[in-house]
Image (spheres, rainbow, N blue to C red):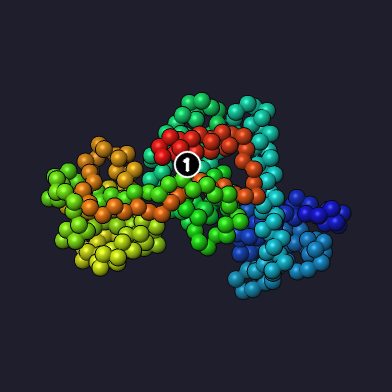
Amino acid sequence: MTPDLLRRGLKLSHLRLMAALLTQSNLGAAARSIAISQPAASRLAAELERILGVAIYTRTQRGVVLTPEGAAMARRAARMLHEIELGGREVDELRQGAAGRVRLGSVTGPAVEAVLSAVTAYRAAYPRVDVGIDVGPSDRMVADLLDGTLDFAIARRPGSVAPALLSEVPIADEPVVFAVRSGHPLVGRRNLELADLMPFDWVVPSEGAILRTTLDSVLRAQGLGLPERVLSTSSFVMTLAATARSDAIAPIAAAVCRAFPGIGLEPLDLRLKIAVETFSYLERRDTDLTPAARMLSDMVLDGFARRI
């Protein structure tokens, strides 16, 4: 937003409309998302096209499609609005004293092993801060981080995301175990081979998940494929339930297996050691964390440092 655009009449309402058009496929929906009427949105769009000197969208049968110039402006508008929101949060935190809101994301293993304990300690020290944790796959965590939903994340940067967009601090790889119910026929056997696990049902992550990709790669290297009987699921709860109630075998993060000792699962003694690629601490390079978020991120990183 250059001084020239400001002199031409660019306003906050123009930015809000452009940011809405990033996620809405028609002008009416964009208008509703920012609580204005469609005629008002049309007037703002016309004003913005006059200010920029280019068309910001084209109409189609399905709605509107941003032009390259419109998309460029919309992305920057969303970023500016996010910075304004963060500025307001920072002022509130400074005014209230260690209060505010922090949202972080994490992949499952680190979440149950280090993130949760850091958040518990943080909430005891700063009870006025509203903390939210989202747990899921790296691609979703990074997408939410980039669109401003999360302040920071413990995840793996997808190859499709440019390194320049994120500040990245590698932490550790994620050991994987093959978990079974107590009393499983393979419990107590030492130095098992992957081939020894093939006669049993497996519960594995859905295709595309980093653990599934790692598992497929390891099996190929051993000259093996998945067993004949496989349940694929993206649900962690379903994985635990199916494994606890049958002789199925589930490859899961070692940290997750350790975190739930009361549900009757234990790791098999496998000769081959398997680990998912290194996960990292990630934050947006173009955004400064608020004081509350920075304090929590420091505690999370300190928690990992004590475990490594």
Residue furthest right as drawn: 7
Residue placed at 35% from the left, 52% from the top? 275
Say how many tags the image has: 1
Query: How far across and how far down the image is residue 209, in percent?
Result: 39, 58
Q: Is residue 228 visible?
A: yes
Residue behind mark 1: 133
Label 1 packing within 10 angstroms: few (<14), some (14-19), many (20+): some
Q: Is residue 298 above or below residue 278?
A: above
Say whether residue 176 is left or right of residue 50: left
From the top left corner, tell me how far across and down residue 300 is, in percent.
Answer: 49, 37
Mark 1 residue element: strand
Query: Where 145 falls versus 258 (above or below)?
Result: below
User: Disc 1 residue type?
Assistant: Ile
Residue 303 is left or right of residue 230, and the answer is right
Nearer to the camera, 81 or 213: 213
Residue name at image x 61 percent, y 64 percent: 25
**Where does the image place residue 264, in percent across and percent down from the top left?**
21, 41
Does the image show residue 201?
no
Q: Is residue 227 left or right of residue 63?
A: left
Q: Nearer the viewer, residue 118 or 171?
A: 171
Task: Please identify the quadrant where the C terminus is shown.
Answer: top left
Residue depicted at 57% across the width and 37% down the height: 293
The front one of 96 and 277 is 277
Locate residue 63, reporting x and y percent: 63, 68
Quadrant that contains the N terminus: bottom right
| Residue in the image at 75% along x and 50% along y | 12
